[in-house]
Amino acid sequence: MEAATTGGDARGAGGSGRWAVGAVCGGLVYYHCAVRRASAVSLAADVLLVLLCSLSILGLLFRHLHISVPVDPLEWQISQEMANSIVASLANTFGAAESVLRVAATGHDKKLLFKVVFTLYFLAALGRVVSALCIFCLYMFAQSTDLFDQLPSWVPTGRDSLGGAQDTT
């Protein structure tokens, strides 16, 4: 019961940020599983890929800006109270999202239905942009390092190494 009351109190300070993160995550999960009809394993793999890309980009940015990041796991631990607060916040977010989607799915509130549909389309487009940006950043990172120089000779590295004849006219 305490988890249900803390969400209403936190709405002024950081509730809108939590709602936005929950809406983005929920929209991306909905798009991936329902619209693309992909499995949960594919969703987990995509999430891990995006996290890996994000962390590598942040690592490169921190290295470029000469910011040291602590790597000692003891510095990253959180207290039991903080863990309970995070879980309660997630439970409130998922409960609120479920109730909003349930009301929107009935079709009685047309304004809410259109907001949900618009948000889902926006999140789908945002997901495509983020994926393209991550792939572009990985490509730029691979081009800036000597990764392609270290590949074995049997791996094609460009258009001219595909084995086809070049048209010189």
Image (cartoon, helix red, strand yellow):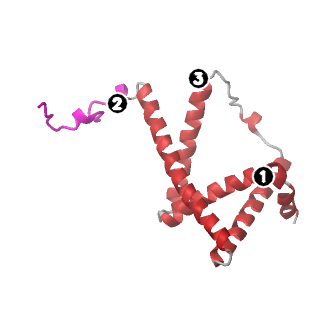
Instruction: Determine the main secondary structure of the stretch shown in magenta.
Output: loop
First in sequence: mark 3 or mark 2?
Answer: 3
The answer to whether the residues at label 2 and label 1 have Cβ atoms under 8 Å apart is no
**In this view, the mark in front (3 or 2):** 3
Q: How far from the left and from the top, in percent, is residue 99?
A: 72, 70
Q: Is residue 124 left or right of residue 105?
A: left
Q: Position of residue 121 (x, y in %)?
A: 54, 60
Residue at image position (60%, 33%) is 58
**Depth check, front residue: 41 or 60:** 60
Specify few, some or many for label 3: CA neighbours under 10 Å numbering under 14, 14-19, or 20 or more: few
Q: Circle 3 sits on which residue?
A: 64
Q: Amino acid at mark 3?
A: His
Of the two numbered discs 3 and 1 in the rendering, the one whose residue sits closer to the viewer: 3
Q: Quadrant of the C terminus?
A: top left
Q: Secondary structure at mark 2?
A: loop
> Which residues lie in the magenta part?
149-169
**Residue at the (74%, 66%) spot, across then down:** 95
- Amino acid type, callout 2: Leu
Q: Which mark is residue 86?
A: 1
